[in-house]
Image (cartoon, helix red, strand yellow):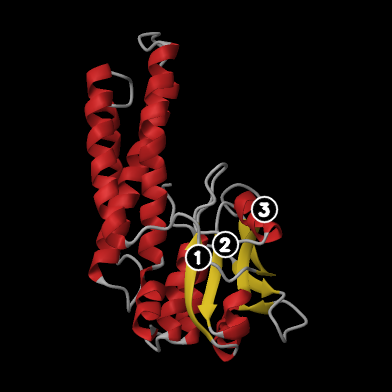
Amino acid sequence: MLEEPRAGRFAAWGNALLAGLVSPDDAAQRTVASDTVHRVTGLPGEPDAVGLTLAFGRLRSLGVAGLRIALPAPGHPLGLSGPPEFNVAALEAGEAVLASGRGAAASIGLVPEVSEAGPEGDVLTEVLWRCLPVRQAPPADVPTLAEAERELAEVLREATEALTALDVAGAGPVAMARLEAYRARSRPRALLAPGYPARAARVLELAQRVGTLVDIASDVASEDESGAVSAAQLAERDRLLRPVERAARRARVAAYNAYAEELQRQQG
């Protein structure tokens, strides 16, 4: 949860391009970020894999009006709409992009395949986005921004109170110190891309902080070698953190999908 999902970058900057707010080259560069190269294969009308700049242009010419994301996990097909082949590929990758628009444009989904090569410190990362057909149906379990923000605040408060009462490793000062250190190392940056509402950026920032805290809490507990935390306490901690992690993922999807959702509302 500490890293921005590639599907999120693809959708956010792709949406900014579709809105005419950034150039194709800028959208491609921001999507690639620290990776080496991104290519797209299986695009209708393109027999070979193409670079992101051409791929974004092709999606626009096909009638794609907006891009959504899915962040599925085992037992939670968040953002998916089928068919099974696409759902399986997305679940294996842990993320996917779904196009929205009219006609064939709404039947395009993209799943990333990541490959790395090279020695430590000089790793080349290539991402191949595979286009697969998707079903035109409402995505699974995606909340509105308002619902996501409210849910995230509620589950975070409830879990924090319960974990503190249990005095479980990862719920207290060590985890909070690591979270503050993480925040200090993180350089301020603009979340999402031009064209997104301010509330989406706020919800995404909260979701990222919550996801970071979940990861840090898990790391702190796994590193505890004192024996002060029992297996039962750790199991209870994991039970309490699961809905928090789930709510953070739902909030991230809601934030990244805010552009496409607003566009759909405007179109009626």
Report crowding for label 1: few under 14, some 14 to 19, many 20 or more residues within 10 A (C-alpha).
Answer: few
Between tags 1 and 3, which lies in front? 1
Indicate which disc residue 81 carries: 2
Report crowding for label 2: few under 14, some 14 to 19, many 20 or more residues within 10 A (C-alpha).
Answer: some
Counting residues from the start of the chain, the first of labels 1 and 2 encountered is: 2
In the rendered image, the quadrant that contains the C terminus is bottom left
Looking at the image, which is closer to me, 118 or 59? 59
Q: Secondary structure at mark 1?
A: loop
Instruction: Name the residue beneath numbered marker 3.
Output: 88
Looking at the image, which is closer to me, 99 or 142? 142
Amino acid beneath label 2: Ser
Amino acid beneath label 3: Val
262 up-or-down from 237: above or below: below
Counting residues from the start of the chain, the first of labels 3 and 2 encountered is: 2
Amino acid beneath label 1: Pro
Q: Is residue 77 left or right of residue 128?
A: left
Report crowding for label 3: few under 14, some 14 to 19, many 20 or more residues within 10 A (C-alpha).
Answer: some
Instruction: Name the residue beneath numbered marker 1.
Output: 138
How many angstroms separate mark 3 from mark 2 (CA)?
Answer: 11 Å
Q: Position of residue 237 (x, y in %)?
A: 37, 24
Find out whether the residues at labels 1 and 2 contact each other: C-beta distance under 8 Å.
Answer: yes
Q: Secondary structure at mark 3?
A: helix
Residue in view at x 38 percent, y 56 percent: 252
Q: Position of residue 215 (x, y in %)?
A: 40, 37
Residue in view at x 33 percent, y 26 percent: 170
